[in-house]
Image (tube, helix red, strand yellow):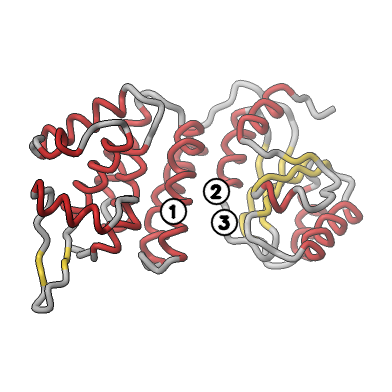
């Protein structure tokens, strides 16, 4: 079982360390282990309790009321508020804990519960993306190591792979979409999402993921002869590099170009194609467009 410092709890929950100490003393919210030098150490269950308390506090409950709840009552209250709210903070917390603890059963329980009411597209935009942003912040601040983020990312990708394989679109456009990443990119969630949506809308998909070089992109275009190209800008790069990439694509192919990803990067360049800043823009466009 992993242990956390009080500073870890503050970063993960947003509750100040000073406040947690007061709650421990006044309400016995959690009882951490202590080292010989009186340093607090919290376990996985205590982290989850603090995250649930943070969720309830953010939803207007008073700590004095929360402190009187048993663990089962606390969990029931969180579930009740979640089901009656547009917020997915509780599920995001569960996915963060899943990542920290390498807990696949927790991931599947949380995901399957969400999928009873929401599509994968909706879950991706409203739950997975905020979760990945939070995980990314924890990674960059050193609060978790890369394998923990990769574990969660791979579980999410498995859901996309399954959804893509299961698509059986009644519509056939007889159009081919070539999906790829620029040479410097590793983040392929947007490709998986676009793969699913385009396949649902009757496109034949060639998704090569990460591409080794620009020359290999051009080789694929020549071989595949696609009707559209789709790629993403996620990782920060020099504007000159981004612009050169867009210019080279435009100059070496007459195929329609489509881009998505980080809006701040995309607004800095002339892509020579259509840019999607939101998922629903992408969905609506390819649901309604014949691309003629």
Q: CA distance from mark 1 to mark 3?
A: 10 Å
Could you classify mark 1 by the number of other residues whose Cα lies within 10 Å: few (under 14), some (14-19), or many (20 or more)? some
- Rendered location of residue 85, percent (x, y): 36, 25
- Rendered location of residue 259, percent (x, y): 73, 45
Q: Which of these two is toward me, 12 or 192?
A: 12
Residue under the point 70% across and 64% down: 237
Quadrant assignment, res 213: bottom right
- Rendered location of residue 162, percent (x, y): 44, 40
Q: Are marks 3 and 2 in contact (CB under 8 Å)?
A: yes
Residue under the point 17% across and 66% down: 41
Q: Which of these two is toward me, 31 or 122?
A: 31
- Dot 3 falls on a residue whose secondary structure is loop
Could you classify mark 3 by the number of other residues whose Cα lies within 10 Å: few (under 14), some (14-19), or many (20 or more)? some
Number of numbered labels in the structure image: 3
Residue under the point 67% across and 50% down: 232
Rendered position, 102 above or below 161: below
Residue, disc 3: 187
- Rendered location of residue 66, percent (x, y): 16, 36
- Dot 1 falls on a residue whose secondary structure is helix
- Dot 2 falls on a residue whose secondary structure is helix
Residue, disc 1: 153
Could you classify mark 2 by the number of other residues whose Cα lies within 10 Å: few (under 14), some (14-19), or many (20 or more)? some
Residue 282 left/right relative to 222: left
Q: Are marks 2 and 1 in contact (CB under 8 Å)?
A: yes
Which of pointers 2 and 1 lies earlier in the amino acid sequence? 1
Q: CA distance from mark 3 to mark 2?
A: 6 Å
Residue, disc 2: 189
Quadrant assignment, res 63: top left
């Amino acid at each position: 079982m992993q242990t956390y410092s009080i500073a870890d709890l503050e970063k993960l929950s947003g509750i100040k360390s000073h406040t947690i100490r007061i709650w421990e003393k006044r309400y016995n919210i959690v009882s951490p282990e202590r080292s010989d030098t009186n340093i607090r150490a919290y376990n996985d269950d205590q982290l989850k309790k603090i995250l649930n308390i943070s969720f309830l506090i953010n939803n207007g409950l008073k700590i004095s009321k929360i402190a009187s709840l048993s663990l089962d009552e606390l969990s029931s209250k969180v579930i009740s508020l979640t089901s009656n709210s547009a917020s997915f903070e509780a599920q995001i917390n569960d996915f963060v804990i899943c990542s920290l603890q390498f807990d696949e059963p927790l991931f599947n329980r949380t995901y399957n519960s969400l999928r009873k009411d929401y599509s994968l597209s909706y879950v991706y935009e409203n739950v997975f993306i905020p979760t990945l942003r939070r995980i990314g912040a924890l990674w960059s601040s050193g609060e978790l190591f890369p394998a923990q983020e990769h574990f969660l990312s791979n579980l999410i990708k498995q859901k996309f792979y399954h959804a893509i394989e299961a698509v059986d679109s009644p519509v056939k456009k007889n159009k081919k979409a070539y999906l790829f990443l620029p040479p410097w990119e590793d983040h392929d969630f947007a490709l998986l999402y676009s793969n699913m949506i385009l396949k649902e809308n009757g496109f034949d998909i060639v998704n090569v993921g990460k591409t080794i070089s620009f020359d290999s992109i051009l080789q694929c275009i020549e071989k595949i002869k696609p009707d559209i190209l789709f790629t993403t800008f996620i990782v920060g790069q020099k504007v000159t590099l981004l612009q050169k990439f867009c210019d080279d694509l435009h100059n070496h192919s007459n195929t329609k170009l489509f881009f998505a990803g980080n809006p701040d990067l995309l607004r800095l360049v002339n892509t020579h194609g259509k840019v999607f800043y939101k998922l629903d823009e992408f969905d609506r466009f390819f649901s309604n467009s014949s691309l003629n």
